Image: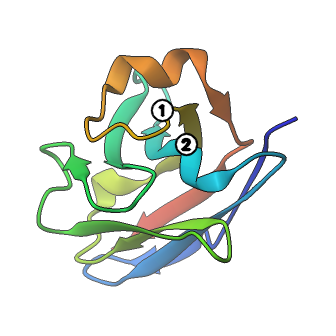
Amino acid sequence: QIHLVESGGGLAQAGGSLRLSCAFSGGTFSDFTMGWFRQAPGKEREFLAGVTGSGGGTLYGNSVKGRFTISRNNVKTTVFLQMNGLKLEDTAVYFCAAVRARGSIFILITSFESGYWGQGTQVTVSS
């Protein structure tokens, strides 16, 4: 069974940085496209970034493009989200997601809906 555990959340100042990690277990990591999402109180879940199984393809949401970077380590079966230039509006619960997509070079955001999800980690940005 696929299991995802996020870590690295916490409190950061506006303009600062945080790095989130998501540890994957229960399957062949490189067969999965990985993604990061977030949900703020009263708002819909928002796609942030995705990375293909090989790590060769990435996709970003418009609100974080140029500030956040997704990466993965297929040996350590972990996906990361480096967040720089944090803004107050980045405050949310951040979720890691995985969808089986062996060999795919494309990232289909809606495919994560039927994938696997972690429990989330809180990120709070203060002024």
Label number found at residue 67: none
Secondary structure of the residue carrying numbered label 2: strand
Seen in the picture, residue 67 relative to 50 is either above or below; the reply is below
Please state if 25 lies on the left or on the right of 24 as rendered. Answer: right
Q: Which residue is mark 2?
A: 32
Residue 17 place in picture, x, y as percent: 37, 82
Residue type pointed to by label 1: Ala
**Gap in angstroms between the C-alphas marked 1 and 2:** 5 Å
Residue type pointed to by label 2: Phe
Q: Residues within 10 Å of mark 2 (few under 14, many from 20)?
A: many
Can residue 108 be seen at all in this image of the molecule? yes
Seen in the picture, residue 43 relative to 85 is either above or below; the reply is above
Q: Residues within 10 Å of mark 1 (few under 14, many from 20)?
A: some
**Label pair 1/2, CB-CB below 8 angstroms:** yes
Residue 27 place in picture, x, y as percent: 77, 45
For the image, the number of numbered tags is: 2
Q: Front-most of 87 and 2? A: 2
Earlier residue among tags 1 and 2: 2
Q: Which residue is mark 1?
A: 101
Residue at the image position 55 percent from the left and 43 percent from the top: 32
Q: Which image quarter holds the N terminus?
A: top right
Please state if 86 lies on the left or on the right of 37 as rendered. Answer: left
Secondary structure of the residue carrying numbered label 1: loop
Quarter-of-image position of residue 110:
top left
Q: Front-most of 88 and 93? A: 93
Residue at the image position 57 percent from the left and 39 percent from the top: 97
